[in-house]
Structure formats: C-alpha cells, structure tokens
Amino acid sequence: MTARKPVIVWIRRDLRLADNPALLEAARTGRSVIPVFIADGTLAGLGAAPEWRLKLGVQHFAETLRRTGSRLLFRQGEALPVLRALVAETGATDVYWNRAYHPDEIARDSEVKSELKAIEITAKSFPGNLIFEPWQVQTGAGGFYRVFTPFWKNARGLPVSDVMPAPQTLRVPDHWPASDNLAAWASRHRMNRGAAIVAPYLLLGEQAAQHRLQAFCDERLQDYARDRDFPAKPATSGLSEPLAYGEISPRQIWQRAKVLWEQGVGGAETFLKELVWREFAYHLMYHTPHILTRNWRAEWDAFPWNTDENHPHVIAWKQGRTGMPFVDAAMRELYVTGRMHNRGRMIVASYLTKHLMTDWRIGQRWFSDCLTDWDPASNAMGWQWAAGCGPDAAPYFRVFNPETQLQKFDPGGTYRHAWIAEGDLCASETAQYYFKAIPRSWHLQAGNTYPAPVVTVKDGRERALSAYETRSF
C-alpha cells in the first residue's frame, strides 16, 4: 500500500526543477508527488522588497509546475500543523525538503522532523541549497573557519557532486488537496508605487537564471576580475537574486564556472571566490548564529555608534541625500532596481558605519527591507565586514573614501549620471525614476538642489579614527 501513497515535497527557497534533490528523490519513488509551499511564521519578518520578490517567485514556480502537468499546493499557517493536516488529507507517508540554515528555520525543521517521525511519517531533508554543507568545510583541528582565505583554500579542493537533472515526470495524485488562494496572498505587498519601477529589473524564474548564467560565462567572465568593481559596467553575473530564492542552485553555478577555471578562462577563479564567499557567510551563520543580530566580535559591544534610526544623518543616508555622490548613486540604484552593485554596497556601508558612526544594524535592516536579492547570511556578514566588527573583517581603521573611490571606479561619471538627477540638465531616465520609486512623504523632486555633504570625508574619517583610538580591539 505504501507504494501508492503520495510523497509531499515541502518547497521553500528552492524554486526550481533542476538540481532540486528533494523533488527528484520524490519523483524517483514512482509515487505521486505533492509539492507544497507553506507561508509560515518564518516569512513574517521579511522586508517589503524580498517579501514581494518571494511571492512573485512562488507564483512563477507554480506556473512552471503547471506546465509540467503538476501543480504547487499553497497553504498558510505554521508548518507543522499544515503538514500534519496535509498528511491526514492525502494519506502521504513521506515528507521531503531541502535544508535551510537560518537558526529559526533549523529550529522549525528539527521540530517538524521529530514530530512527523513520532507519527511514523518518513521525514527526509536533503542538501540542495549550498555547495558545501556548513559542517563539511573544517579546519585541521575539526573546527569551523573564522577567516575566508583558508576556508576558500580548503573548499576549492573538496569534491562537488554533479548537478541533478530535473525530474522527467512528476506523477500527480488522483485527487489534489484544496489549496489556499496563492494569487490573493501574492497580491498583498508593501512595495506600493515602487513595485512598478523595480519590476522591469527583476530576474524571475529558473529559465531566466540559466540564460543569465550562460550569457555571463560566454560574454563577461573573461574580464570579470578586471571589471567587476566598476559599477557602470555590466561586468557582474547578476545571479544574486535567483540564488536568494533558489531559482538556480549554487552548485549549478559552481560546476559551470569550475570547468572554465580549469580551462584557464580569466576571471573564473575570482568569480568562484565570490560564490564561495556566500558559502562562508552560511558557514558562519550556522556556527555562530549571533552574527545575524549582535557584533560578531564582542569587544565591539561598547563602541559608541549612533543607534537613532531617525537621526538626520541616517535619514539622509536612507534617502540617498548625503552629498556624497557615490553613496547617493548607490542608494538610488537600490530604490530603482532593487539591487546594488557590490562596490556600492561596500561604500554605503562604510560611510554609514564610519563617517556617520552609525550602528551597522540600522543599515542591515534597511537593506533587508529594500533588496530584492536579500540574503540573511550574506547581508549580516557584509555589514559586519564593512563596520569592522565581524569575522574576516577589513581592518577597523580602514575607512573607504567615497570621493576617491568614485574617481577610481567611475572616472567618466557614468554611474553618477545614471542615478543622480539634481543639478544635471540632461538627467538620465534612471535618475528620474528614483523620484517615482521613493515614498511621496519624502517630498523630493529632481529639481531640488543637490545637498552638501552631511559629513565631509575628512571630518568623518578623523572622527572615526579618534573613536577607534580610544578602544581596545
């Protein structure tokens, strides 16, 4: 009788058919497969942009499954009672899912697995959303890495299994259980008028991600190491967004780029290091989960950062009105596209935490609300790296100069022109879109005067260094 019972596949941030171990294993049983996405409490804390993007991704994956002849069941509620109810409704004897690594998700999944096994339901989790499991890359003493370079040197030599194909068929149940209203859930979001501005920049779905990877490898990988820091150049992969929602797996990217590295393609090694930097972030989130909410280095707990979200300097930073063109251009790129170039992320984070002496968690929260490619591990580690209080951090006394950085990485002013309209008689379309994306309550217009620096490069650097000198790090 078990051979006729369906298998439930709990879909989370793995919105793809290929290289989806839980889905493929369920298909290989030869039994009917019921994919289900559960909108549970772990989604409650999502910011406006990532929540909206997740909902679009779930809808898109539902359509992908529909085209295969299957469907995506959608349920709202806490995971355990939803899965229990679904088991009772369908007679399923197995529940499969791909692992998650956020501490809240680990706690949830552990409870689900324990409770399902208690009622004699087979509950299996699979490694599908990282290249290396967080416990797989170990130091010689068997511990975890705290510095990236030795982590990379170890990880690059580890075997990586082949990419799994998409299931050829997904057998459907004789009767589908009822589904909650996915369209109604997806239509409720907090992006307001910004949604229409950001939408054209989204990279939605598995097929689009694969096309982006192919184009990047064919056209831009060769020069990646040289060009990746120039924000006006289309030099990066643009895959952070589909990676965040599992529309492409990191293993798919690794295997494609690793072959090119072995063939001697320039830029491939640098690109793989950036991919493994994401792995390092998950490695640290797993082993030191306090990285998400507290200073990774406890000696920074007494540092006199500003913690006032409504401080005028913080408001100017959020609005892209600091008077520092590189900072402001990057923040405006964020509001129009939902993403920000990595060089820009470093500059805006350094300026907030060092020139403006503001707690990194304020920036972390703002990014988590605005980024369509938001990733909890990468976001936390990036902010702590920039602030100087995290693992493998830039030296705390390193203060990026946003003026010289702009001269170096945007010598022709292309990036600035693309995103800053004030004072530009021929303001670009993208620069003007910023005023259509931001909240009306900001009362900003393209005709406003561009502001003077809220804190100059010299004053901000001196203030930061003075504060560092009085601390023992």
Image (cartoon, rainbow, N blue to C red):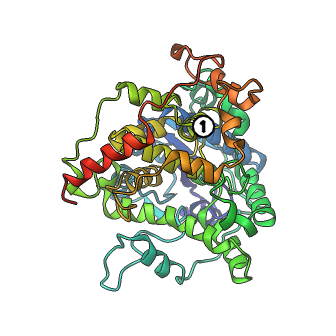
Occupied quadrant, residue 200: top right
Q: Is residue 166 visible?
A: yes
Image x and y of residue 246, in percent: 59, 54
Occupied quadrant, residue 24: bottom right
- Is residue 46 toward the left or the right of residue 354 in the image? right
Q: Is residue 33 visible?
A: no
Image x and y of residue 102, in percent: 40, 53
Dot 1 amino acid type = Ala
Quarter placement of the N terminus: bottom right
**Residue at horizontal 64 percent and vertical 64 percent from the top:** 19
Secondary structure at numbered mark 1:
helix
**Residue at horizontal 52 percent and vertical 31 percent from the top:** 323
Q: Nearer the viewer, residue 233 or 11?
A: 233
Image x and y of residue 167, in percent: 71, 63
Q: Nearer the viewer, residue 193 or 352?
A: 352
- Is residue 352 toward the left or the right of residue 276 in the image? left
**Residue at horizontal 70 percent and vertical 71 percent from the top:** 256
Quarter placement of the C terminus: bottom left
- Whether 205 is drawn above or below 454: the answer is below
Q: Residue furthest front?
A: 458
- The residue indicated by pointer 1 is 329
- Whether 278 is drawn above or below 266: the answer is above
- Is residue 34 toward the left or the right of residue 152 in the image? right
Image x and y of residue 449, in percent: 59, 19
- Whether 389 is drawn above or below 147: the answer is above
Q: Dot 1, crowdedness within 10 Å: few (<14), some or many (≥20)?
A: many
**Residue at horizontal 65 percent and vertical 76 percent from the top:** 162
Q: Nearer the viewer, residue 379 or 126?
A: 379
